[in-house]
Image (tube, rainbow, N blue to C red):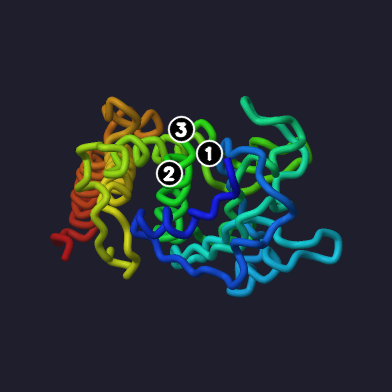
Amino acid sequence: MADPLWLADVLRAEGLKVIEHDGWKNRGHGDFLDIRGVLCHHTAGGGVNDWRVVQDGRSDLPGPLAQLVLERDGTFRVIAAGVCWHAGRGSWPGWPTNNANYHVIGIEAVNDGRGQEWPAVQLDAYKRGSAAILRKAGRGANDCVGHKEYSSEGKIDPFPIDMVAFRRDVQALITNSTASGGADVALEETFVNYRGNTVTLGTAVRFIDQHVNEIREQLGGPKPFNGWPQLGGKTMVDAIADTNRKLDDLTTAVNALVAASTGKPAA
């Protein structure tokens, strides 16, 4: 397979925002041997100029350092079409050990990797962009890999994303995409959420499912929601009601003591 000169077109076809950097089609450290997957990173900077390091490199490593930079607003910057120095040493099933740079596309997502929030619109674009690339390359989500999973050098990116769950969402996008002939097109419709971020309906549904069940568990106890051990097997609602009853009983007892000691009813 030749270098992925189709990157910008494939991402735009997925409905994603794209910035093409001048000269990207001729930028890189040589040509791909073939394309076997996507390697996911965080930039470790977290700022608006992280792309400059990815494009131009560092004092110890010449750029480009990845084909794509994903901004926090969900915009993809297309930096290079050729090989980039992003993988380092490591292994993953089906990828050549210590030589993934010539076989996988790197996405550097802007995040400091030290607890900076991942905006929903960025995560949504991360998954949709990965799915679009893998679909074009004829690969499945098993070839969407976190640098921390591939690396034998102690890498932690993309922190703290759960790559198992990430791959599950990417595979759903590959399977249900209009480009793959899937019928679940409605989940790819976008809307602006209450934070002002543009997200897909599918992302919203997954978010609602997760958080509704987390709230349900907090109120009812762990599945099957029949109470918390530390509340004596009661749900949170039952525990609060029991506490209210005990407070009422205590108030009644205090009032009776006051009346007995003063000969007058408590106020």
- Label whose residue precedes the other's in the sequence (2 or 1): 2
User: In the rendered view, would you say 78 is above or below 130?
Assistant: below
Q: Is residue 214 left or right of residue 146?
A: left
Residue 170 visible (yes or no): yes
Is the residue under label 1 in contact with that under label 2 (CB below 8 Å)? yes
**Residue where numbered disc 2 is placed:** 131
- The image quadrant of residue 57 is bottom right
The residue type indicated by label 1 comes to: Cys
Residue 215 visible (yes or no): no
- The image quadrant of residue 152 is top right
Is the residue under label 3 in contact with that under label 2 (CB below 8 Å)? no
For the view shown, which residue lies furthest in the left direction? 265
- For the N terminus, the quadrant is top right
Task: Give the numbered dot on residue 144.
Answer: 1
User: In the rendered view, would you say 233 is above or below 251?
Assistant: above
Q: How many marks?
A: 3
**Residue where numbered disc 3 is placed:** 140
From mark 2 to mark 1, how far is it between C-alphas?
8 Å
Place of residue 216 in the rendered image (x, y in percent of width and height, measured from the top left): 27, 40
From mark 1 to mark 3, how far is it between C-alphas?
8 Å
From mark 2 to mark 3, how far is it between C-alphas?
8 Å
Q: The residue tagged with tag 2: helix, strand or loop?
A: helix
Place of residue 87 in the rendered image (x, y in percent of width and height, measured from the top left): 71, 45
> Mark 3 packing: few (<14 Cα in 10 Å), some, or many (20+)?
some
Query: Which of 3 and 254 lies nearest the eye of the viewer?
Result: 3
The residue type indicated by label 3 comes to: Gly
The residue type indicated by label 2 comes to: Ala
Task: Give the numbered dot on residue 161.
Answer: none
